Image: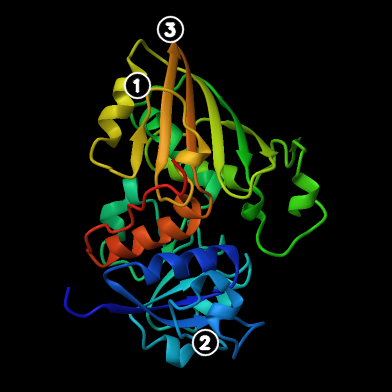
Amino acid sequence: MNQRLRVGVVGATGYVGAELVRLILGHPAFELAAVVSSSSAGRALSDAIPGLLGLTDLRLEAFDAARLSKLDAVFLATPHGKARPLAAQLDTRVVDCSADHRHAPGWVYGQPEYHGARLFGARRIAAPGCFATAISLALAPLVQADLLDGDVQIVGATGSTGSGATPTQGTHHPERFANLKAYKVLKHQHVPEVREFLSGLGRAPELHFVPLSVPVDRGILVTCFARLSRDVDAAARFAHAYAPHPHVRIRAGTPELRHVRGTVFCDLSVHQDDRQVVVLSAIDNLGKGAAGQAVQCLELALDLPGATRFPPCTP
């Protein structure tokens, strides 16, 4: 591509926004043309995100719908509840990383492995949630093949960046350090999102989900317990389902967070005892669970070759 596409990031100083900035700056098809922060307008981006020193001269600016609408695309990395009024003002392609437009009319739910055809040419894209991504990819092949018998039990561990950059008593990293606790037991907001997605593939099972807060900064590891409706090789089913999708990797052992950290990969492993199946799913909540997947969605919308296969941060 001779001329790169100009994109902007609204909410550029949050965790998801900063990850978007990192990915876009290294992307061969995109030019980072605008970075918006309601609290830091006028400040140099490299002052707000010190790791970018020497990599960009951009300065943070206030939200200006007219200016942003002149760009080829805008990512919204705002807190939940803030994106809807901003998106309504933008006359350009929008990728919303918040929960505001997931499964909303007129918006494409941005699941690249299953909604690639819908994403082509889309101008309003809602990126899935982080837990939703890890769980959906772990269960979709079984739902699509109508292989589930009964409810599915899920336990998922998540790092502290999943709660956003503004600390609260329950999510602040010092409160999580050397600690392990469950939260929102059987009441997590991503469960309806997952069931809505799965219902588009087949019969969506009832999901019983226990999320865990663990003392890591980024990453999600989900364990799904399911029973098969008939005798099949579940691992072979997963290998076939994801063979065309290089961002989903099937592992022989068990996935580890360090192998997906800083990437847009989802690592899965399938373990079977007769008809009992356990599926393990690992993603980086800021990568495949947010910013990285949002970039994948824009690539698909614009029919660009995938360029977001970054290696993990640690071996």
Mark 2 vs 3, N-terminal side: 2
Distance from label 1 to label 3 (Cα)?
12 Å
Distance from label 2 to label 1 (Cα)?
49 Å
The residue positioned farthest toward the left in the image shown: 2
Based on the displayed image, in which of its 4 quarters is residue 186 positioned?
A: top right
Using the image as rendered, state which of residue 111 and residue 217 is in the foreground. Answer: 217
Three-letter code, disc 1 = Ala
Three-letter code, disc 2 = Arg
x then y, percent, for residue 115: 33, 51
For residue 274, which numbered disc appears in the image?
Answer: 3
Q: Quadrant of the N terminus?
A: bottom left
- In the rendered image, is residue 171 in sight? no
Residue that numbered label 1 is attached to: 235
Using the image as rendered, state which of residue 164 and residue 207 is in the foreground. Answer: 164
Residue placed at 74% from the left, 52% from the top? 173
Contact between labelled residues 1 and 2, with CB atoms less than 8 Å apart: no
Label 2: element kind: loop
Residue placed at 45% from the left, 92% from the top? 66
